[in-house]
Image: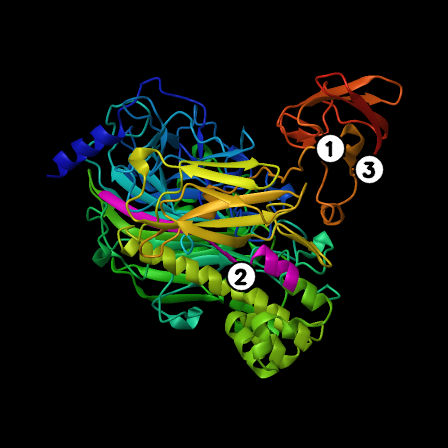
Amino acid sequence: MKQKKLLILIFLLTFFLVSGVHAQIVKLVKVGKVEARVYDHGCQSADVYERGMVKYFRGSYVSKSDENSTSPIQLIAEAGLLFGARNWVDTNGHTWDAMITGHCARLRDNDNDVYQFAVPDEEGVPIKRIFAYPPPQIIVDGVHCEPSWGSSGDEVAPEKVWGTADVMVESNVRMSMGLDVKQRVLAWSQPGHDDYVIWDWTFVNTGNVDRDPEIELPGQTLDSIYIARITEALINGTGDNKVLATFAGTTEDHDTSLSYPQDDDSLRIDYVTPLRAGSSSKDSYGLKVDAGIWNILTGARFGGSAVLFAPKSTDVQQFPNTSESNDPAQPSMHTSLLAEPSWMLLHNGVLADFNTMTASEFVDAYEVMVKGVFGIDTTILNFQEAYYMDSLYDVYDTTASGASTFYEQPIDRWGELDPDRGYAYASDIAWLRWDQQCHCSIGPYQMEFGDTLRYVFAYVGGAINRKNSYLAGEAWDNGSAASYSWLAEMDSAQMVEELKKRDPIFNVYYDIGGFNTTLSLNDIAKDLLVATGKDSLFHNGMNAQRNFNMNYEIPESPAPPSVFEVASGPDMIKLEWSYEPAYEPSNLAFFKIYRAQGDYVYEKQGEIVIGDWQLIDSVDGDADSYEDTDVVVAYDYYYAITAVSTSGVESGMFLTMTLEAANLQSYPGDGLEMVRVVPNPLNVNSSARTRYPEGYGLKLSFVELPPECTITILTESGNLVTTIEHTNLSGTEIWEARGQFLLTDSDQQPMSGIYIAHIETPDGEYVARKFAIVR
């Protein structure tokens, strides 16, 4: 039976071209608040692609300028996968006491990698992205502004997507110990399930150690298998390496003293939290201090990696799920170490390459996969952190497999457990850096030839949202945080008690007066609001756990419209949408229309607010258009439409969010003498918060134009800058080219100076208008 199972799995996993080396391919998953990059070869190192493997793109503080950056919004910077075994026999017949394969923060080009690499399928495709419905086309005034979805290996095939996921990415990976890995990554767009992305791995002992289809190690049993994951989270950015250090911890469902309980549910998660800075002049909890911004809670974010399924044995663990074979005591090891995998650093401090490791070094590294810092020989490696963390370790009963379990206490409890050391701040721990990594392992397992082993986890985010980061930060900055929102319902004693539940460091140091800065009620109220991001993190992690437990069959949201089009007009902005007939949802009840003004990202300064998304209306499920007449000329408007099911489940608004602005246009003017240029002068250096009261932004608009005309823009000395053909029959035209404002015919930004607009109608009438640009 096992031989038959093996042959089937080999057939599914190992068809590929013998010469099938290729450049690395990455698929983007971006349907909810979390954006993930999935690599064809399963390696998740920061070195192999743009730093920022998983971003909490819309779930936390993020500005438009952050969209293409990494550290301000990343959830997971990089992650490694290592597979260790005892008594492994290589292709030369040599037996290793311990052997490890995989990757941990190492650059590999995939073409020449011998440890972990992609295995193309029978069609030569190494990685596929499969959608449950056609990704929406989003069109604003004739311009497509949706992300680029289609590429090799992409398809719409709802019958192939597991459960009710919106998208699934799958790839085949091989590891040099003789393992094939089927990697599936699933994501949902609906609210409540858009704060996590799930990785579902199935390992198969195929005995194939390289890229050709030959089985080099037939019949070999993999002994005492451990699978280790190493995750570096930088959710609060790099910043000061002692101020916003990654703060890893764990919650354990079999020992509630190690967890922050929520509704009696269990959650196995490594997580990062904001820190306080001992050197700061203010209470810095929730702030990215190195940014120098004190009135916006830019660091009020949490992130984690939650284990959803770790089996008791190598029983076949395939979809659908078999929760009775889950081992609640797994993972069996948790550690937080420096960003480089400390236990893989050799005596000379150089990151290990498996080709250079000795047999004894493999044994040492394997022991760390089993025990964490308990496995580090500190007399040889001399890691300062190991001395301290040894005292913070607990050894519990056993896993279902009979192995001892090792757990490091959550780092956000270190001060509570050992207050005499005075570790109230990250800066108090000399070796704790901004790029700490969480390590965890599952095992041990015996994998006979042909056996499978399933392992499922999720990357999860939690935070107070960007709007609250402004409003609450503003309230704290002016001393009124205790009166902000729901905090106004609580007295000081209640606030202290609730904060102690969420922040163990505060729990200890508040009582003994250990903070360098005396915390006021204003500080405590702000800190409590920041700490509720931990509630969100754990809530979202439990949603991921329940999703897995339900075989990924959480209630299904309707598919969003296949096409969503927004058109500017002279008396309204019109929204229209439609479905491809094959994907029109049967459970559709109605649509919700959302709108933001000025920008699609929230910003606030004083009374000026932009990017505040609001529900403006709901329309019946048989509607296909909407006219927004509550708009003002030349302001920027952004829209999103969601579909709501008969059971009340809503599709994700980020699927249809317009990232290009629509504008109410003026009616044509009564004569050329009515033509105006606004704003005049245009100060392109003014900030968005001062631009948008006028609504024009970096746009130069011509208003009260005739229905058709030609606008020729010249320098003051008469040189041609650009020509704009106004043909939309309205009274408004904006100076832009190829979707960018203020571009000349040679794709340059105009310099500061005086310009002349020559406006001429088809019948030869014309008028000239002078305007200024200031940089």
Dot 3 amino acid type: Asn
Please tell me whether residue 298 belongs to the stretch shown in magenta.
no
In percent of width and height, residue 120 lies at 33, 26
Dot 2 amino acid type: Tyr
Q: Which residue is mark 3?
A: 680
Magenta stretch, main secondary structure, is strand
Q: Residue furthest left?
A: 1
Quadrant in the picture for residue 50 = top right
In percent of width and height, residue 538 lies at 44, 62
Residue 387 bears which disc, if any? 2
Q: Which of the marked residues, 3 or 2, is nearer the chain's N terminus? A: 2
**CB contact under 8 Å: marks 3 and 1:** no
In percent of width and height, residue 150 lies at 42, 28
Q: Is residue 367 visible?
A: no
Q: Which range is magenta?
A: 452-471
Label 3 – label 1 distance at C-alpha: 21 Å
Are there few (<14), some (14-19), or many (20+) residues within 10 Å of tag 2?
some
Label 2 – label 1 distance at C-alpha: 82 Å
Q: Nearer the viewer, residue 43 or 485?
A: 485
Dot 1 amino acid type: Asp
Please, what secondary structure does the residue beneath circle 3 have?
A: loop
Locate the N terminus and report the quarter of the image it occupies. top left
Residue that appears at 41% across and 69% down: 262
